[in-house]
Amino acid sequence: MNTLSYRTESVSKEKAEHKWYVVDAENQVVGRLCTHIASVLRGKNKPSFTPHADTGDFVIVINADKIRFTGKKWDQKEYKNFSLHPGGLRLTTATALWEKDPRRIIERAVKGMLPKNILGRQVYKRMFVYAGTEHPHIAQKPETLKF
């Protein structure tokens, strides 16, 4: 009988280390960029990933106003909001949403890729999106994250 035990360690939220990363969204395709961001927020890039614990990192996204879509998505992609009232469906194109607030495109894409529960809402709070190159998180000494 083999006495060695190969047990996987589950990391609790108290033991998890949260690093800070900066992602430059300039000239990046939205969908591909946001899948990487969601993975880092969730902690799936770490060997200590635990599905039920918050083991992810903080992500700062800069240059959100310089993102790009492929194809004709600027005119054809629609974002839906429904007020739960009859006739309460509002459709917004990607161009209109970008003109109103460019950060919302990345925020909505990443939020849709996270779990729809308490853990997903907690993980989402660790993402900070800025339209320009400046951000107020210099004291955390974030590392640059390349994809």
Image: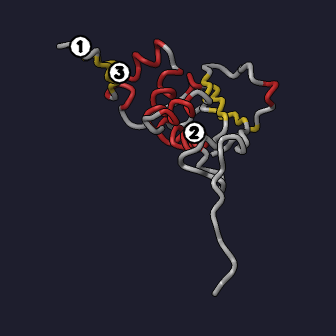
Instruction: Describe residue 38's horizontal placement relative to residue 73 as left or right.
Output: right
Q: CA distance from mark 2 to mark 3?
A: 23 Å
Residue sticking out furthest to the bottom? 1
Q: Which residue is mark 2?
A: 37
* Image-based side of 101 in relation to 14, left or right: left
Which of pointers 2 and 3 lies earlier in the amino acid sequence? Answer: 2
- Quarter of the image with the N terminus is bottom right
Mark 1 or mark 2: which comes first in sequence?
2
On screen, 106 above or below 83? below
The kind of secondary structure element at disc 2 is helix
Q: Earlier in the sequence, mark 3 or mark 1?
A: 1
For residue 76, what is the image quadrant?
Answer: top left
Report the amino acid beneath label 2: Ile
Tell me the kind of residue under disc 1.
Gly
Q: Residue at x 37, y 31 (%)?
A: 73
Q: Which residue is labeled 1 in the image?
A: 88
Residue 110, placed above or below residue 32: above
Q: Position of residue 90 (x, y in %)?
A: 28, 16
Q: CA distance from mark 1 to mark 2?
A: 32 Å
Residue 133, picture quadrant: top right
Q: In the image, what residue type sits under mark 3?
A: Thr
Relative to 65, does residue 46 appear above or below in the rendering?
below
Numbered disc 1: secondary structure = loop
**Local crowd at mark 1 within 10 Å, few (<14), some, or many (≥20)?**
few
Query: Residue at the spot x=66%, y=58% of the render?
Result: 9
Residue 42: percent from left, percent from top = 57, 42
Q: Is residue 117 left or right of residue 84?
A: right
- Residue 91 in picture, x, y percent from top left: 29, 19
From the image, tell me which residue sits under label 3: 93
